[in-house]
Image: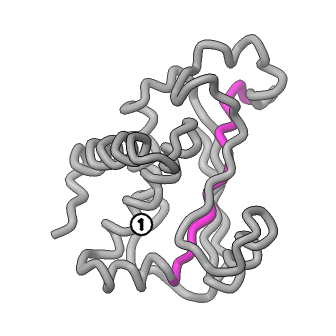
Amino acid sequence: MTLNFEYETDIKLDLDYEALIEKVVEEALDAEGCPYEIELNIILTDNKEIQAINKEYREVDAPTDVLSFPLVDYSSPSDFSHLEEAADDYFNPETGELLLGDIILSVEKVMGQAVEYGHSEERELGFLVAHSMLHLFGYDHMEEDERAVMEEKQKIILDSLGITRD
């Protein structure tokens, strides 16, 4: 597994964010039965930068907590069965790893939402990474039934790691 981290803000999280993100990514891969080693880009930034990205790609002129940019097209969420048929599109030719996509996180939102929701920054960051990983596997939450599925999967991932709201 290759995780490419970029920390693009002077605002510092007071935790080992790389180890936490790696742990959540690994658990999400296991929970969804991903049969491949993956490559993933993780960018930690501030509200100003994530707002600019949100505006450019989603036409929403406001900061958000996390953005997910999947590189895989799924026929249904976590359906990995067709990926090898398009290996040139989905796999790094040098490493053979599945190019999963990009996760962009606002450090300011992680800190603020941890306070707002009354839990740790670790829990907030873990939640956002689990949420984003599910988007990278093709899940969405536009409809109520989709939202319920994502919430249950997020809970399973975080509970298995002992990352709770306490």
Q: Is residue 103 magenta?
A: yes
- Depicted 131 relative to depicted 88: above or below: below
Can you name the residue that lies furthest to the left here? 166
Q: Position of residue 105 (x, y in %)?
A: 57, 68
For the record, the magenta segment spans 95-108
Q: Quadrant of residue 38?
A: top right
Q: Position of residue 114 (x, y in %)?
A: 34, 79
Question: Residue at 67% across / 75% down in the picture?
Answer: 50
Question: Residue at 29% across / 43% down in the picture?
Answer: 152
Task: Return the residue nearer the eye: 3 or 164.
Answer: 164
| Crowd around label 1: few <14 · some 14–19 · many ≥20 (10 Å) | many
Question: Residue at 61% across / 43% down in the picture?
Answer: 2
Q: Position of residue 58 (x, y in %)?
A: 73, 63
* Overall secondary structure of the magenta section: strand
- Depicted 2 relative to depicted 44: above or below: above
**Label total for image:** 1
Which quadrant of the rendered structure holds the C terminus?
bottom left
Q: How is the image coloured?
A: one colour
Which structural element holds mark 1? helix
Q: Quadrant of residue 112?
A: bottom left
Q: Amino acid under label 1?
A: Leu
Which quadrant of the rendered structure holds the N terminus?
top right
Question: Residue at 73% across / 29% down in the picture?
Answer: 95
- Depicted 40 relative to depicted 107: above or below: above
Can you name the residue that lies furthest to the front here? 144
Tell whether 61 sits left or right of 147: right
Residue topped by disc 1 = 125
Tell whether 34 sits left or right of 112: right
Q: Position of residue 59 (x, y in %)?
A: 76, 69
- Depicted 6 relative to depicted 10: above or below: above
